[in-house]
Image (cartoon, rainbow, N blue to C red):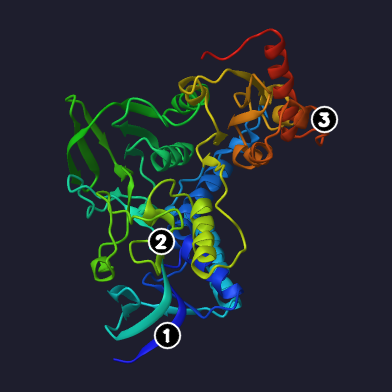
């Protein structure tokens, strides 16, 4: 069988695969991307962005963005159909997928459709939808196959009313009630979205707390808000059985409780897509979670094969995946373009309201025995925040007490995932109180909250109100 040779073969056309391929092609390398899915873009473009677009649609339908216009009811009264609700989401998905295709074309990258598997560390066999085979060879190979939802056998995933994050937007109708198994990011984001659409939502979580990595004060506000919107939490529970019937699903918990709803969303995590890659033929190893093992240069055990994105595990974010792939190609081809992935990584949770964070928490600083000081301000005290009716939003800044250097930023409220960028840049530049006090922010703007949170921290420092160490 004849083979075609490339400087770089990329397996997977998600964010990591696309950006890794573009990085190498920009520097003149001959590149091909192999993608088995119908559309490029990976999970983020095909389900992630689509789900977030549905979130925005739900806010418009519910009148959430006009929530402070007393006496004016903007809630959509018509019985909702799925096609109407997801239409905008699918339009956005198609636009984003088209953008990925355009970027691939712009960099003269060959896009080869089919499933890839290793013959050896330099050779990949591709089988397309018509069962036709071809072999490709590459000096360098980048594995960026992403992840997929975990589907434990206890859940009848073939039932018409049981979904995961890949299939949720294919539901035939919006249910009156929904049980969500999993209290992580995906579970809580969809809980908020469907609650805004008038669905009675119950969230079941094995852990006793939401987002244990996040600031506890911020998450307490989020949970309170979600419960006010009618979302029911069953925490510290394990599903022991689940039965699906045409009009309902029935779940039994380890505590003996039973939950019945019209539909179920299973959001218990994701796992890397490596099953059919025949990694053993290239001498590549995975850990007990199926994640590819790499060194700090993103090399696998086969030194010409690199891996990036969800397939290597935490943090498994779109933003970090793209940077990992770019850095892997810098290392692979000695491009001398950049030295490392950003050392500070922001997190965003698209619940309602949004939550965003970057840097240390009070808990991590206490564990490190670092004395700190906190500054807070609230959306309701900010003219822009008051204008948009954000009553519970908060910006929380954490500074080292010894030198007033910013070490953590935590936000809950509208536009939190945008506002966090200001804090991230300040963290990257090791800014202190003066960075925000000396700055002149637009007025009225939410960004101006950074100044007033810093004033609060200054006051706490002067009065020796330190965090516990």
Q: Earlier in the sequence, mark 1 or mark 3?
A: 1
Q: Earlier in the sequence, mark 2 or mark 1?
A: 1
Q: Earlier in the sequence, mark 3 or mark 2?
A: 2
Q: Name above or below for residue 210 compared with residue 289.
A: above
Q: Which residue is mark 3?
A: 438
- Identity of the residue drawn at 58% across and 71% down: 103
Q: CA distance from mark 2 to mark 1?
A: 21 Å
Q: Name above or below for residue 211 compared with residue 378.
A: below
Front residue of 330/24: it is 330
What SS does tag 3 mark?
A: loop
What SS does tag 1 mark?
A: strand
Q: Name above or below for residue 241 compared with residue 367.
A: below
Front residue of 445/5: it is 5
Q: Residues within 10 Å of mark 3 (few under 14, many from 20)?
A: few
Mark 1 in CB contact with mark 3 (< 8 angstroms): no
What SS does tag 2 mark?
A: loop
- How far across and how far down the image is residue 337, in percent? 62, 63
Numbered circle sitting on residue 299: 2
Q: Nearer the viewer, mark 3 or mark 2?
A: 2
Q: Which residue is mark 1?
A: 5
Residue 419: image quadrant is: top right
- How far across and how far down the image is residue 289, in percent? 27, 49
- Identity of the residue drawn at 69% across and 7% down: 463
Q: Nearer the viewer, mark 1 or mark 3?
A: 1
């Amino acid at each position: 069988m004849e083979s075609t040779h490339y400087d770089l073969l990329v397996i997977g056309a998600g964010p990591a695969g696309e950006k890794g391929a573009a990085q190498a092609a920009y520097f003149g390398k001959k590149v091909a991307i192999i993608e088995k899915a119908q559309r490029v873009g990976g999970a983020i473009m095909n389900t992630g962005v689509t789900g977030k677009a549905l979130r925005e649609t739900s806010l418009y339908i519910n009148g959430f963005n006009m929530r402070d216009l007393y006496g004016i009811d903007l809630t959509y009264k018509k019985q909702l159909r799925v096609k109407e609700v997801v239409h905008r989401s699918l339009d956005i998905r198609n636009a984003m997928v088209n953008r990925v295709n355009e970027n691939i074309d712009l960099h003269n990258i060959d896009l080869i459709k089919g499933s890839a598997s290793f013959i050896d560390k330099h050779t990949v066999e591709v089988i397309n939808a018509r069962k036709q085979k071809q072999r490709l060879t590459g000096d360098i190979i980048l594995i960026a196959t992403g992840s997929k939802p975990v589907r434990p056998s206890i859940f009848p995933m073939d039932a018409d009313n049981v979904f995961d994050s890949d299939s949720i937007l294919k539901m035939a109708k919006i249910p009156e009630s929904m049980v969500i198994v999993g209290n992580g990011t995906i579970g809580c984001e969809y809980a908020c979205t469907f609650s805004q659409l008038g669905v009675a939502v119950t969230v079941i979580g094995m852990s006793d707390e939401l987002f244990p990595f996040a600031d506890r004060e911020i998450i307490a506000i989020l949970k309170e808000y979600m419960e006010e919107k009618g979302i029911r939490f069953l925490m510290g529970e394990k599903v022991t059985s689940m039965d699906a019937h045409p009009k309902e699903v029935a779940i039994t918990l380890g505590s003996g409780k039973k939950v019945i709803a019209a539909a179920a969303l299973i959001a218990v995590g994701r796992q890397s897509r490596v099953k059919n890659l025949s990694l053993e033929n290239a001498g590549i190893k995975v850990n007990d979670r199926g994640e590819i093992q790499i060194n700090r240069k993103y090399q696998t055990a086969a030194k010409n094969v690199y891996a990036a994105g969800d397939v290597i595990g935490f943090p498994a974010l779109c933003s970090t995946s793209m940077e990992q792939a770019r850095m892997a190609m810098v290392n692979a081809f000695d491009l001398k373009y950049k030295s490392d992935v950003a050392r500070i990584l922001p997190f965003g949770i698209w619940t309602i309201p949004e939550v965003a964070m970057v840097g240390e928490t009070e808990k991590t600083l206490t564990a490190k025995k670092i004395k700190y000081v906190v500054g807070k301000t609230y959306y309701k005290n900010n003219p822009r925040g008051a204008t948009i009716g954000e009553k519970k939003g908060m910006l929380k800044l954490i500074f080292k007490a010894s030198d007033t250097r910013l070490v953590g930023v935590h936000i809950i409220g509208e536009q939190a995932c945008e506002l966090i960028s200001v804090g991230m840049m300040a963290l990257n530049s090791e800014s202190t109180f003066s960075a925000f006090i000396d700055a002149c922010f637009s007025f009225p703007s939410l960004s101006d909250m950074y100044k007033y949170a810093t004033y609060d921290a200054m006051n706490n420092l002067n009065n020796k109100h330190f965090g516990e160490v």
